[in-house]
């Protein structure tokens, strides 16, 4: 990252402009050096080794690369890694773990809300985001909330069932 | 993987941002990145210097007298979360319908969409209908451009290589609004959009504005003078006149892989009427 370096009228192409990115990922301070052209999804997977975040369309359509950045669900293929400097990120690995799944993960598990699992990060984060804003979502609310995520297995009905189940569970769970 | 060996800049002043852009062989401003980054990933756009707006202090929505100022870093979600009455209802209606899910609404910016000027995107016609002025800063100073003049052609805007759109300035004179769009699938760009506004006039009546997006290369303002200054009734005669005015106003039609210009021309009138019906409904309520 540069706030002072001169712009590249002709970068010395043998020297790749690079940045050290320091951020909090899943409650852990992390730091990595990467070329400025690195996408956040590439940083998360290739530098931080968190492979639950998937690189799908790289076009902002499929949602498989979704993470939470500073409280907002975000498609990490649409962010340059240096732009994530100083942020707090939760990836799908930070939601829960075997034996202690997030309630939304439990609902997806119980209702067979995923098949190949590729789109799962986006579906989970979109569901959590929906339930953060809406306790009792309608089917239209659910479909609208999932609209930024594409399931290549086309298992949408099971996903909607899973979200409905998660909504019922979280509504029953006292704060 | 982006193939260009770009350098990322996050300057702390607009002046510095403009200097970086001016000195670069190929600079670009990143607002939300939702359009620019995929284009860079696909190698459709080669950028040597990517200038991010994040530290420029342009992430606010502010009231300034009888206008509202929307900074270059303001996202659709931030428009939706603005306190009631701060932003025109047309903007919130549009922001709620942005394609791509909550993630895109969290990341995409109004100014970024305006600067990209995709004929089929939601923002251009809305900015024209709201009589928006774009505040622009470059190395030679600042200037203001009305939205109707800012959009010069498909993907072409009145913006120099060293310039940044810093804010949108929108007159806070909207009394009611209506918005409609036609798109063929959930994740697709709109084919045609229509944005309608009723602004209270000083004589106690209304001034109506309508803009059509997607039918031509730029958003097209449509004359609604025949509606007068009173509340209108959207009866068959009025609807016919609206359709006729839309057809008469459309210039060179826009075609792309989603729809030919002839199709856009045919649906522009009905979509305009849908927006006016929403406007009428809002005025009634």
Image: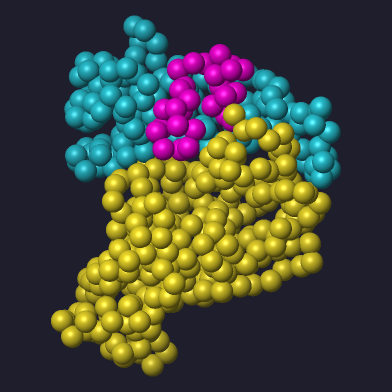
Which part of the image, by quadrant, shows the C terminus of chain B? bottom left
Residue at (41, 28) in percent of width and height: A64
Tell me if B34 is positioned left or right of B215 in this view: right
Q: Residue furthest bottom?
A: B203
Tell me if A63 is positioned left or right of B6 in this view: left
- Counting from the top left corner in percent of width and height, residue B92 is at 38, 58
Q: Is residue A89 above or below residue B53?
A: above
- Counting from the top left corner in percent of width and height, residue B250 is at 39, 75
Q: Is residue B90 magenta?
A: no
- Counting from the top left corner in percent of width and height, residue B98 is at 38, 51
Residue A108 visible, this orientation: no
Residue at (58, 17) in percent of width and height: A46
Q: Residue furthest top?
A: A99
Q: Is residue B57 above or below residue B142?
A: above
Residue at (46, 61) in percent of width and height: B119
Chain letter, colour cyan in render: A
Residue range highlighted in magenta: A39-65
Q: Is residue A91 above or below residue B39?
A: above
- Counting from the top left corner in percent of width and height, residue B153 is at 53, 66
Residue at (62, 44) in percent of width and height: B45
Q: Is residue B4 above or below residue A120?
A: below
Tell me if B96 is positioned left or right of A1 in this view: left
Q: Is residue A54 magenta?
A: yes
Residue A57 visible, this orientation: yes
Q: Colour of chain B?
A: yellow
């Amino acid at each position: 990252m540069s706030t002072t370096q001169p712009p590249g009228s002709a970068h010395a192409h043998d020297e790749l402009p690079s940045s050290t990115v320091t951020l909090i990922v899943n409650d852990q301070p992390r730091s990595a050096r990467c070329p400025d052209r690195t996408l956040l999804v590439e940083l998360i997977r290739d530098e931080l080794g968190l492979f639950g975040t998937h690189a799908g369309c790289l076009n902002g359509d499929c949602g498989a690369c979704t993470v939470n950045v500073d409280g907002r669900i975000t498609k990490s293929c649409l962010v340059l890694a240096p732009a994530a400097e100083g942020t707090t990120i939760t990836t799908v690995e930070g939601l829960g773990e075997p034996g202690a799944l997030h309630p939304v993960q439990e609902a997806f598990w119980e209702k067979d809300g995923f098949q190949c699992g590729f789109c799962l990060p986006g579906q989970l984060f979109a569901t959590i985001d929906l339930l953060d804003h809406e306790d009792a979502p309608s089917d239209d609310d659910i479909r609208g909330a999932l609209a930024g995520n594409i399931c290549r297995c086309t298992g949408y009905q099971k996903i909607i069932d899973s979200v409905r189940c998660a909504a019922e569970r979280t509504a029953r769970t006292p704060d | 993987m982006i193939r260009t060996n770009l350098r990322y800049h996050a300057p702390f002043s607009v002046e510095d941002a403009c200097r970086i852009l001016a000195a670069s062989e190929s600079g670009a401003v990143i607002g939300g990145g939702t359009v620019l980054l995929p284009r860079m990933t696909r190698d459709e756009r080669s950028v040597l210097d990517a200038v991010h707006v994040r530290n420029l202090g342009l992430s606010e929505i502010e009231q300034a007298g009888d206008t509202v100022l929307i900074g270059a870093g303001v996202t659709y979600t931030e428009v939706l979360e603005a306190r009631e009455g701060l932003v025109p209802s047309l903007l919130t209606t549009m922001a709620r319908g942005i394609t791509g899910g909550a993630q895109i609404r969290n990341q995409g910016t109004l100014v970024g969409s305006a600067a990209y000027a995709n004929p089929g995107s939601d923002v251009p016609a809305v900015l024209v209908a709201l009589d928006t002025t774009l505040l622009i800063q470059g190395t030679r100073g600042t200037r203001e451009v009305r939205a109707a003049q800012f959009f010069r052609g498909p993907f072409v805007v009145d913006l120099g290589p060293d310039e940044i759109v810093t804010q949108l300035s929108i007159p806070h004179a909207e009394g009611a609004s209506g918005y409609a769009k036609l798109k063929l699938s959930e994740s697709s760009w709109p084919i045609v959009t229509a944005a309608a506004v009723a602004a209270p006039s000083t004589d106690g009546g209304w001034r109506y504005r309508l803009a059509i997006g997607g039918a031509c290369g730029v958003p097209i303002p449509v004359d609604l003078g025949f509606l007068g200054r009173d509340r209108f009734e959207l009866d068959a005669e009025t609807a016919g006149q609206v359709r006729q005015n839309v057809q008469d106003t459309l210039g060179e039609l826009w075609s792309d892989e989603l729809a030919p210009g002839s199709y856009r021309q045919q649906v522009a009138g009905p979509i305009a009427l849908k927006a006016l019906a929403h406007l009428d409904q809002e005025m009634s309520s």
